Image (cartoon, grey):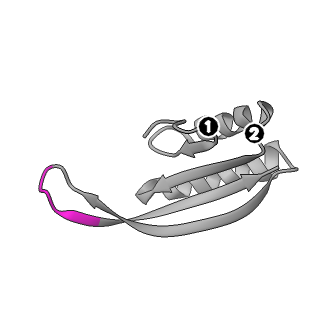
Amino acid sequence: MSAQKQNNTIFVGKKPVMSYVMACLTLFQNGTPDITIKARGRAISKAVDAAQIITKRFVPGVTVKSVDIATELVKNLESGATNSVSSMEIHLCK
């Protein structure tokens, strides 16, 4: 997953947590009022950590607007089977 795909969306993957924190801070400093942090599977804990670091340490004026959870169907490229993967979106606003 890439660190930034849309203007206000951060996709969390295999990078360290601070990479996503810095991406969010950059967006906030550039004037973006709302940011969405998206993650699937094992990366969900990194997304939660990044959101907590942003709201508690770096930008005290930022709040968690909403948290959406879902299950996505993902097709395995090797076997062709379809698996259910948990996903989460954390919406932050200034």
- Image position of 15 (left or right of 53): left
Say which element carries label 2.
loop
Residue carrying label 1: 7
| Residue 67 position in % (x across, y down) | 63, 66
Crowding at mark 2 (Cα within 10 Å: few <14, some 14-19, many 20+):
some
Q: Position of residue 1 (x, y in %)?
A: 42, 40
- What is the number of the mark on residue 83? none
The magenta region covers 78-83
Is residue 40 something that shows in the picture?
yes
Residue in view at x 79 percent, y 35 percent:
31
Give the number of the disc on residue 32.
Answer: 2
Q: Are marks 1 and 2 in contact (CB under 8 Å)?
A: yes
Q: In the image, what residue type sits under mark 2?
A: Thr
- In three-dimensional space, the C-alpha distance between marks 1 and 2, rounded to whole angstroms, equals 9 Å
Main SS of the magenta part reads loop
Quadrant of the image occupied by residue 29: top right
Amino acid tagged 1 = Asn
